[in-house]
Amino acid sequence: MLSEQLHTLRTRQGLSQQALAEQLHVVRQTVSKWEQGRSVPDATTLPRLAEVLHTSVPELLELDTPADPSSIQAQVEQLQAQLRREAVLRRRRGFQVLTLVALLLSVGSLVLLGLAGRELHLLQQTAAPIIGGGDAATQIYVTSLVPDLLLCVPPLVLLAVGLIGLRRTYRK
């Protein structure tokens, strides 16, 4: 692949990414992206790149036959299309992970709220004498300051986001 070939030829010439970038009038990060396979040089940069690395464009692209400008352009376009597909897949995988995290958080929150709500309800029903007083025991009642339904809104929103995300992730 171009990225591996570029790295091999650059290191064989004893050039750093920065030195190669300066000779091509690009930034070092551009060379790094080329070597990582995250982008490819355009068809106008390839001849200069091959010249700096003391090779030919077909060898740089690892073509079996001598290349004409149209086949070089076609090869570059093919590489760019492949990179775009891979980027879409990476974004989709990231979105799937975020969706699953949202679903797990929402379900976990709803379960915890359900358990906590049941415990609060039991406490509200069974107030017990806790502190003794001179005349009688003082009873303390635990009441919820926030209505139970309002506590369910954030997890339900997370659940909705997760379900929408699942739908978007798996549709074609």
Image: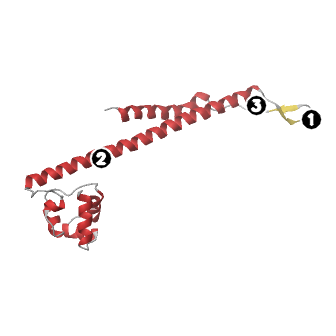
Amino acid on which the number 2 mark rests in the picture: Glu
Position of the N terminus by quadrant: bottom left
Say whether disc 2 or disc 3 marks the residue closer to the N-terminus. Answer: 2
Name the spot of residue 10 as percent of width and height, x first.
24, 68
* Nearer to us: label 3 or label 1: 3
- Label 2: which secondary element: helix
Marking on residue 141 = 3
Q: In this orientation, which residue lies closer to the viewer: 140 or 73?
A: 73
Question: Residue 55 appears in which quarter of the rendering?
Answer: bottom left
* In this rendering, position of residue 165 left or right of residue 59: right
The amino acid on which the numbered mark 3 sits, given as a three-letter code, is Tyr
Relative side of 83 to 71, left or right: right
Could you say which disc has been placed on residue 113 in the image?
A: none
Q: Name the foreground residue: 138 vs 2.
A: 2
Residue 44 pos. (x, y %) = 13, 59
Depth order, front residue of 159/121? 159
Q: Which residue is mark 1?
A: 134
Residue at the front extreme, as displayed: 64
